[in-house]
């Protein structure tokens, strides 16, 4: 029911757990659901290409707490761009919804390897090196970097 509510799929008179979720709560449920699906479907199986083995190295409760902590630490802003997140149900632009990013794309969903970014940033970054991606974003912003 919480997942249905997070995605806005509940009927008007239907309630999840006798409460309504706010936008941030809906985003948290959606992020956790996305991580679960990613981990479930990416266990190294052979498909037309090999999907990376992605594991969740914490319990659901620990993941929930970590996501909440990241929102607080990052002040509800993208770790890479600093842009403010929009939250599920109140968003104007789906690209501004929060998305959980593995800093090291070769690593797993583990504490210390996760940050919240805007959905479009996660899509753009894909498997890029985090430092290199940040350098490129800085160039786009017009900042000169001495990395090269």
Image (spheres, rainbow, N blue to C red):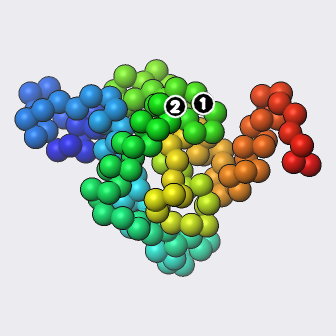
Residue corresponding to mark 2? 77
Judge from the rendering whether residue 145 lies leftward or rightward of residue 9; answer left or right: right
Counting from the top left corner in percent of width and height, residue 86 is at 45, 27
- Residue 14 numbered mark, or none: none
Evaluate whether residue 41 shows in this view.
no
Residue corresponding to mark 1? 82
Quarter of the view holding residue 60: bottom left
Q: Quadrant of the N terminus?
A: top left
Assess whether mark 1 and mark 2 are in contact (beta carbons under 8 angstroms).
Answer: yes
Give the answer, above or below, for where 50 lies relative to 20.
below
Q: What residue sits 35% from the left and 55% below the top?
A: 63
Evaluate whether residue 35 shows in this view.
yes
Q: Secondary structure at mark 2?
A: loop
Give the answer, above or below, for where 136 lies relative to 20.
below
How packed is label 2: few (under 14 Cα within 10 Å), some, or many (20 or more)? many
Q: What residue sits 38% from the left and 50% below the top?
A: 66
Counting from the top left corner in percent of width and height, residue 64 is at 32, 50
Q: What residue sits 38% from the left and 59% below the top?
A: 37
Counting from the top left corner in percent of width and height, residue 88 is at 37, 31
Q: Secondary structure at mark 1?
A: loop
Judge from the rendering whether residue 76 lies leftward or rightward of residue 117; answer left or right: left
């Amino acid at each position: 029911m919480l997942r249905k509510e997070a995605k806005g799929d509940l009927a008007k008179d239907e309630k999840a757990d006798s409460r309504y979720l706010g936008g941030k709560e809906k985003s948290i449920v959606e992020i956790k659901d996305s991580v679960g699906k990613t981990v479930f479907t990416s266990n190294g199986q052979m498909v037309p290409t090999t999907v990376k083995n992605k594991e969740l190295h914490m319990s659901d409760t620990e993941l929930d707490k970590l996501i909440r902590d990241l929102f607080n630490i990052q002040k509800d802003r993208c770790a890479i761009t600093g842009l403010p997140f929009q939250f599920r149900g109140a968003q104007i632009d789906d690209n501004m919804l929060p998305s959980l990013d593995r800093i090291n794309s070769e690593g797993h969903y583990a504490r210390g390897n996760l940050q919240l970014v805007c959905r479009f940033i996660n899509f753009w970054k894909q498997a890029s090196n985090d430092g290199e991606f940040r350098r490129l974003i800085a160039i786009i912003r017009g900042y000169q970097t001495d990395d090269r």
